[in-house]
Image (cartoon, rainbow, N blue to C red):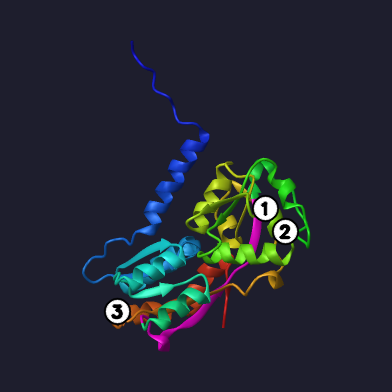
Amino acid sequence: MRQSRRKPGRLGSALVAVLLVLCGMAKPAPAQGGDVVVFAAASLKNALDAAVGDWQKQMGKKVTVSYAASSALAKQIEQDAPAHMFVSADLAWMDYLAGKNLIRTDTRWNLLGNRMVLIAPKDKARIVDVKPGFDLAKILGDGRLAIANVEAVPAGKYGKAALERLGVWPSVSARLAQAENVRAALLLVSRGEAPAGIVYQTDAAADPNVTIIGVFPQDTHPPIIYPVALTTKGAGPDAMSLLAYLKSPDARRFFESSGFSVLK
């Protein structure tokens, strides 16, 4: 008797898709001989791809960018990954590498700012007043809250801090769908596998399948700051040139068009 093959359900398909995203982001891409290698927070992908592309056209040079959670990238750099530049989504992981003497502190610069938002699938979006005691559990219904890992990933830590400050954390802490990085959390909501999620404003803007249903007040979490620095491997002139470009007005337009605030 022939046995029928069981097709994967929606959740199974979604988990496979998330795993593919994570596999693609978590491993540093192989660099060619003279490439500038950049390790950058996953939330920067759209804006940084555009900025790096412009620099490559201007300079005729090659850049390899690996995107993942700042925590994962910092650990890879600690383990001697060949990154010339690191762009973190928070100060803590840059401080971590500075404490290990793995970045050139004279090149460190607070580059960008962002906002934390609550999102829902576009076809199920209802605006929420994000304020102390708001009923996030009701919004979730029988589902879970998509969020990056709340203990290690910057977006997850910011999100948890905001929920704690608003007095909402106890009602949802056992109902989290934690992801390896913020783009993986975004994907869960985008595919309709989570009824709501906490991501950066820039992530929400990059995905047409989600809608921002609420914005977290900035005083509910630590300031969102993206620092950039060259690593101790990034002493070459090309890495220095790229860093200077990212701090220039030429790059500013790519960051601002993606929703980042450029810090001075």
Q: Which mark is residue 203?
A: none
Q: Position of residue 72 (x, y in %)?
A: 41, 64
Q: CA distance from mark 2 to mark 3?
A: 43 Å
Of the two numbered discs 2 and 3 in the rendering, the one whose residue sits closer to the viewer? 2
Which residues fall within the magenta stretch? 102-119
Residue that label 1 marks: 172
Residue beneath the point at 71% across and 73% down? 219
Q: Which residue is mark 2?
A: 168
Residue 162 vs 16, above or below: the answer is below
**Can residue 174 be seen?**
yes
Q: Is residue 67 left or right of residue 32?
A: right
Q: Quarter of the image for the C terminus: give it.
A: bottom right
Q: Residue 5's quadrant in the figure?
A: top left
Q: Which residue is mark 3?
A: 233
Asked whether 128 falls inside the magenta stretch, the response is: no
Residue type at mark 2 is: Val
Please, what is the three-letter code of the amino acid marked with disc 1? Val
Q: State the residue lying farthest toward the top.
A: 1
Confirm or deny contact between disc 1 and disc 3 (CB under 8 A): no
**Disc 1, SS:** helix
- Circle 2 Cα neighbour tier, 10 Å, few/some/many (<14 / 14–19 / ≥20): some
Viewer-side residue, 244 vs 197: 197
Residue at 47% from the left image edge and 36% from the top image edge: 12
Which of 166/84 is in front? Answer: 166
